[in-house]
């Protein structure tokens, strides 16, 4: 009888151990399933539009999906620009910050030689330009002044931004023209006015010796003739 009680007790202990083992396995399995479900719930959906459209439209949610799912943010887009450049051109500050945080190449150039900073300035997005400069973007204010003039800009804030950071009004391009001469050739009265008000030399001459006033008269741009004469051009 005593031997039987010992055997029964041993079997009970084995049964209890097995029961605890099985319960532990089930709890571990349930925990693993719960973790997997939570991870799945926390994952953003895959993008439903292209990265190009996301940046064009300013859709930050779609941009974050692209970033999560590994879209290359330094790949050229259908318009020949890069995501950071499109965001800068559109004035999307949060997107610019987000792209920079995730490794966007700040100084990458388009086929036309424009950086994100260039495009921000040319589009009058001076707040975006501030962000890019703070993050170390390459910056040549005098060169960019000539590029802005050649692009036909009329934005006074962009001009002031460049001048405040050292742009030289008398810098010349490859053809020997200053920003004022470029503005005269384009009959860009607004830009010429901004430049003259900022101190551009109204008596500047082109490479072949033609003065700003003589150029304006030859091109018959009457508003610019009056502007130059009002500021003492000879």
Image (tube, helix red, strand yellow):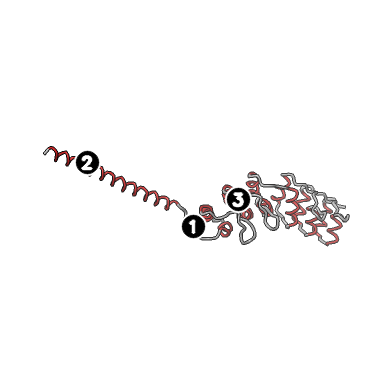
Seen at 72% across and 55% down, the residue is 154
- Check whether the beta carbons of the residues at disc 3 and disc 2 lie within 8 A of each other: no
> Along the polypeptide, which appears first: circle 3 or circle 1?
1
Q: Which residue is mark 1?
A: 46
Image-based side of 164 in relation to 23, left or right: right
In terms of secondary structure, where does tag 2 sit? helix
Q: Position of residue 49 (x, y in %)?
A: 53, 60
Residue underneath mark 2 = 13
Residue 181, x across and y down, in percent = 81, 55
Work out whether residue 124 can be spotted.
no
- The picture places residue 128, in percent across and down from the top left corner, at 63, 49
Residue at horizontal 83 percent and vertical 62 percent from the top:
220
Distance from disc 3 to disc 2, alpha carbons, whole Å, reads 63 Å
Specify whether residue 213 is in view.
yes
- Residue lying at the far front in this picture: please name it: 3
Q: Along the line of sight, which residue is nearer the eye, 78 or 16? A: 16
**Residue 125 in the figure: left or right of residue 198:** left
Choose top left, top right, bottom left or bottom right for residue 87: bottom right
Q: CA distance from mark 1 to mark 2?
A: 52 Å
Q: Nearer the viewer, mark 3 or mark 2?
A: 2
Q: Which mark is residue 104?
A: 3
**Disc 1, SS:** loop
Residue 54 location, x and y as percent?
A: 55, 58
Secondary structure type for disc 3: loop
Q: Earlier in the sequence, mark 3 or mark 2?
A: 2
The N terminus is located in which quarter?
A: top left
Identified at 63% across, 46% down, the residue is 131
């Amino acid at each position: 009888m005593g031997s039987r009680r010992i055997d029964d007790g041993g079997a009970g202990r084995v049964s209890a151990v097995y029961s605890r083992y099985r319960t532990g396995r089930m709890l571990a399995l349930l925990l693993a399933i719960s973790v997997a479900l939570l991870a799945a719930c926390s994952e953003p959906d895959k993008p439903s539009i292209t990265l190009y459209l996301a940046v064009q439209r300013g859709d930050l949610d779609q941009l974050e999906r692209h970033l999560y799912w590994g879209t290359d943010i330094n790949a050229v887009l259908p318009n020949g620009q890069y995501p950071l450049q499109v965001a800068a051109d559109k004035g999307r500050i949060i997107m610019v910050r987000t792209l920079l945080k995730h490794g966007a190449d700040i100084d990458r150039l388009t086929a036309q030689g424009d950086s994100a900073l260039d495009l921000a300035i040319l589009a009058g997005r001076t707040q975006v330009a501030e962000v890019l400069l703070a993050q170390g973007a390459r910056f040549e204010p005098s060169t960019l002044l000539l590029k802005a003039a050649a692009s036909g800009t009329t934005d006074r804030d962009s001009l002031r931004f460049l001048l405040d950071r050292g742009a030289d009004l008398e810098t010349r391009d490859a053809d020997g023209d200053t920003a004022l001469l470029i503005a005269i050739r384009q009959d860009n009265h607004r830009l010429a006015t901004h430049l003259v008000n900022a101190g551009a030399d109204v008596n500047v001459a082109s490479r072949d010796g033609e003065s700003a006033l003589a150029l304006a008269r030859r091109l018959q741009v009457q508003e610019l003739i009056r502007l130059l004469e009002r500021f003492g051009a000879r």
